Image (cartoon, grey):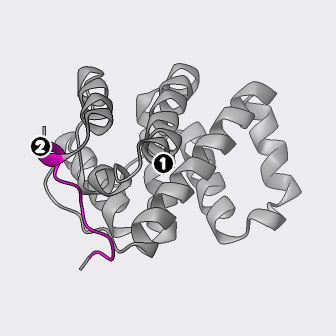
């Protein structure tokens, strides 16, 4: 059971309703995580809105599939039920089994980096960074790393507050 209640959007403030409507207008869904974050609109914007805008940037640089694999690997390594469930469903819709899929060289590198930043962010192997630099430029590495940090923040938020995964509400 979640440690913090989810807001009832219909009974929320105009500021919350506006944030929800803006989020939906961008084509996003309202999840249990978001209904929990919406206790404070600035917290929602800081974690969710920034994640979405950075994810858009990441997808421009490396593509949607690679971005999804990277973010899923972070959630799996962090053992975040909410985010892992989200990405598991996304991959199932695309008939992808993460355990047996034939990843590209770049996707394998991103998954390795994702796991490394979760396991031990203070000691990412130099050899891994050298391979990242061979595959990505510095801007791309900054965006990839920042998205990883935001993904970890999402995972921590869900785990600390014990947000329960549920079906997405439009």
Dividing the picture into quarters, in which one does residue 84 lie?
bottom left
Front of the two marks 1 and 2? 2
**Label 2 crowd (10 A; few <14 / some 14-19 / many >=20):** few
Main SS, magenta residues = loop
Most extreme residue toward the front, as rendered? 13
- Residue indicated by mark 2: 10
- Tell me if I can see residue 97 in this picture: no
Q: Residue at x 67, y 62 (%)?
A: 116
Q: Residue at x 74, y 63 (%)?
A: 121
The quadrant of the picture occupied by the N terminus is bottom left
Left or right: 95 in relation to 76 = left
> Percent x, y for residue 115?
60, 62
- Tell me if I can see residue 48 in this picture: yes
Most extreme residue toward the right, as rendered? 126
**Label 1 crowd (10 A; few <14 / some 14-19 / many >=20):** some
- Residue indicated by mark 1: 43
> Percent x, y for residue 106?
59, 38
Closest to the observer: 166 or 7? 7
For the residues labelled 1 and 2, the Cα–Cα distance comes to 19 Å
Vertical comparison of 21 with 71: above or below: above
> Percent x, y for residue 16?
30, 39
Most extreme residue toward the bottom, as rendered? 1
Q: Residue at x 36, y 58 (%)?
A: 83
Dividing the picture into quarters, in which one does residue 143 lie?
top right
Count of number-bearing discs: 2
Which range is magenta? Answer: 2-11
**Looking at the image, is mark 1 or mark 2 earlier in the sequence?**
2
Q: Are marks 1 and 2 in contact (CB under 8 Å)?
A: no
């Amino acid at each position: 059971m979640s440690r913090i209640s989810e807001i009832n959007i219909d009974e929320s403030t105009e500021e919350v309703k506006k944030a929800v409507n803006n989020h939906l207008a961008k084509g996003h869904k309202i999840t249990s995580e978001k209904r929990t974050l919406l206790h404070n609109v600035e917290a929602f914007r800081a974690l969710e809105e920034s994640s979405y805008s950075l994810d858009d940037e990441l997808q421009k640089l490396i593509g949607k599939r690679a971005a999804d694999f990277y973010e899923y690997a972070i959630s799996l390594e962090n053992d975040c039920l909410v985010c892992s469930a989200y990405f598991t469903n996304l991959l199932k819709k695309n008939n992808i089994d993460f355990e047996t899929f034939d990843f590209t060289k770049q996707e394998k590198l991103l998954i390795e980096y994702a796991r490394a930043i979760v396991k031990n962010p203070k000691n990412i192997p130099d050899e891994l960074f050298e391979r990242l630099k061979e595959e990505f430029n510095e801007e791309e590495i900054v965006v990839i790393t920042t998205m990883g940090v935001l993904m970890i923040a999402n995972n921590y938020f869900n785990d600390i507050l014990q947000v329960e995964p549920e079906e997405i509400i439009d």
